[in-house]
């Protein structure tokens, strides 16, 4: 069925979105591009539809305060996810994509990255333990934080970067959809009252760990990848290569993770819960864009190596199609923000619907900025400039959050404004860089 859909898309020009790619019709990479898009669309649908089914139920059963505690714990553990990612989702994806036909090289990349990730996971667990025993704000809920840390374990075990590099997204989709489905069912079965809030992070972690182990079995069986011990020099080389991406990725991730974290430091769990519940709606919409960008990034990178002019033309076509859609969706959500919040969560946080009105413009800014920042700057090799933009914007975002929330005591409104200003800053700098360097890029 999936193959038939893909064939329909590329055989009939009416259904074809990007004329630039029409030049390579009937080629295997064309099928792969749209196949990856299809599978990633299913994946993102599962990643956000299932939580939107269980989230309103959780908010009503465990209450906003306990939901806020879980959100704060998730934000805290998010820092360790940043550390264990270490930029490999981009650097290792690129390396696997380039060397996919060289089995020995693929074994080396896979083994080196996994060794590094397990080392970073062990370091993360040590740092978490220190945090829990030094500060009472965290230590009084140790079981919640240790349970949530299972998400890091699952993330390390699941090498998404490998499947993206191989452009075999169907495996990611199958495993993640299955684990999401199990988690959603488990929430309705095992979470029956407020005291059951402790079960939620355990269920989340178990789903990730099961999916992680399953992915490793798929890699061994279907791709014949073997885990091999690597020399220290080899491991250092992959650390160094990912380092250039890790720093800006860490900066941006620190900023996005710090939204709920900073709010939790200066307010209370109930406020964090309201903010997180509203932000999930925006995240769900952003998730719709991820399959498009994740499918296009490796493709644009390869197209650029063949023809920079064609790659630039493709980026322009993407902008012409997506920007009007993003604007319309943003305005529709902004106008109906209160209705959406009432429908999902009821009256408890209806007074915070203005947060969705503000944050939905993040969806617009991020959607456009990704095209300029990643599909152009990163794919065309302007890594230093990309890094500078991310570092500046992230630093500004954290500073604004501390000022609006910590100093001015503006709470959830201040946090929302700081997010919007930061994302607009990223968009502005990326757009200016695109205008400045697009002619140079095709020379």
Image: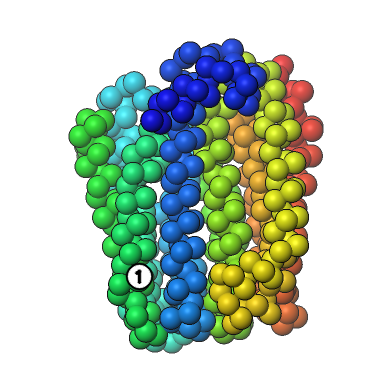
Residue 262 in view (yes/no)? no
* Residue 383 spot, x, y in % from top left: 61, 37
- What is the crowding at mark 1: few (fewer than 14 residues within 10 Å), some, or many (at least 20)? many
- Does residue 141 sit above or below 231 in this rendering? below
Q: Quadrant of residue 380?
A: top right
Q: Which residue is mark 1?
A: 187
* Residue 392 spot, x, y in % from top left: 69, 53
Q: Is disc 1 placed on a helix, strand or loop?
A: helix
Q: Is residue 250 left or right of residue 135?
A: right
Q: Is residue 104 left or right of residue 273?
A: left
Q: How many marks?
A: 1
* Image point (68%, 38%), residue name: 322
* Image point (55%, 83%), residue name: 270
Q: Quadrant of the C terminus?
A: top right
The figure's colour scheme reads rainbow
Q: Quadrant of the N terminus?
A: top left
* Image point (79%, 39%), residue name: 432
Q: Quadrant of residue 167?
A: top left
- Does residue 401 sit above or below 235 in this rendering? below
Residue 376 in view (yes/no)? yes
* Residue 404 spot, x, y in % from top left: 73, 74
* Residue 47 spot, x, y in % from top left: 45, 54
* Image point (31%, 59%), residue name: 182
Q: Nearer the viewer, residue 182 or 405?
A: 182
Q: Quadrant of residue 373?
A: top right
């Amino acid at each position: 069925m999936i193959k038939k859909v893909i064939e329909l898309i590329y055989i009939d020009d009416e259904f074809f979105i990007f004329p630039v790619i029409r030049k390579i019709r009937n080629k295997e990479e064309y099928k792969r591009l749209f196949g990856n898009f299809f599978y990633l669309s299913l994946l993102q649908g599962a990643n956000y539809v299932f939580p939107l089914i269980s989230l309103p139920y959780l908010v009503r059963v465990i209450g906003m305060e306990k939901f806020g505690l879980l959100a704060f714990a998730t934000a805290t553990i998010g820092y360790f996810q940043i550390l264990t990612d270490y930029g490999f989702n981009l650097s290792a994806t690129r390396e696997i994509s380039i060397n996919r036909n060289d089995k020995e090289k693929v074994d080396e990349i896979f083994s080196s990255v996994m060794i590094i990730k397990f080392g970073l996971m062990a370091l993360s667990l040590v740092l978490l333990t220190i945090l829990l025993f030094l500060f009472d704000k965290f230590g009084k809920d140790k079981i919640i934080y240790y349970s949530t840390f299972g998400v890091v374990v699952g993330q390390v075990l699941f090498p998404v970067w490998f499947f993206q590099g191989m452009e075999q997204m169907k495996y990611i989709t199958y495993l993640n959809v299955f684990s999401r489905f199990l988690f959603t069912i488990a929430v309705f079965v095992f979470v029956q009252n407020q005291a059951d809030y402790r079960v939620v992070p355990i269920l989340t972690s178990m789903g990730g760990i099961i999916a992680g182990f399953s992915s490793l079995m798929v890699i061994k069986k279907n791709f014949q990848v073997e885990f091999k011990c690597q020399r220290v020099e080899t491991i250092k080389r992959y650390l160094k290569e990912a380092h250039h991406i890790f720093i800006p990725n860490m900066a941006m991730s620190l900023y996005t993770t710090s939204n709920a974290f900073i709010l939790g430091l200066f307010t209370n769990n109930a406020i964090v819960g309201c903010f997180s519940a509203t932000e999930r709606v925006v995240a769900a919409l952003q998730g719709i864009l991820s399959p498009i960008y994740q499918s296009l990034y490796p493709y644009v990178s390869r197209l650029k190596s063949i023809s920079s002019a064609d790659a630039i033309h493709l980026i322009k076509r993407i902008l012409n199609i997506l920007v009007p859609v993003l604007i319309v969706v943003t305005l529709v959500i902004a106008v109906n923000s209160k209705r959406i919040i009432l429908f999902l969560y009821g009256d408890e946080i209806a007074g915070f619907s203005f947060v969705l009105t503000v944050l939905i413009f993040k969806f617009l800014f991020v959607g456009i900025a990704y095209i300029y920042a990643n599909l152009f700057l990163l794919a065309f090799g302007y890594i230093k400039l990309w890094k500078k933009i991310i570092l500046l914007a992230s630093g500004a975002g954290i500073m604004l959050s501390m000022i609006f929330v910590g100093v001015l005591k503006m709470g959830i409104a201040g946090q929302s404004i700081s997010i919007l200003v930061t994302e607009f800053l990223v968009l502005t700098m990326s757009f200016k860089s695109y205008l400045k360097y697009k002619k140079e890029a095709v020379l």
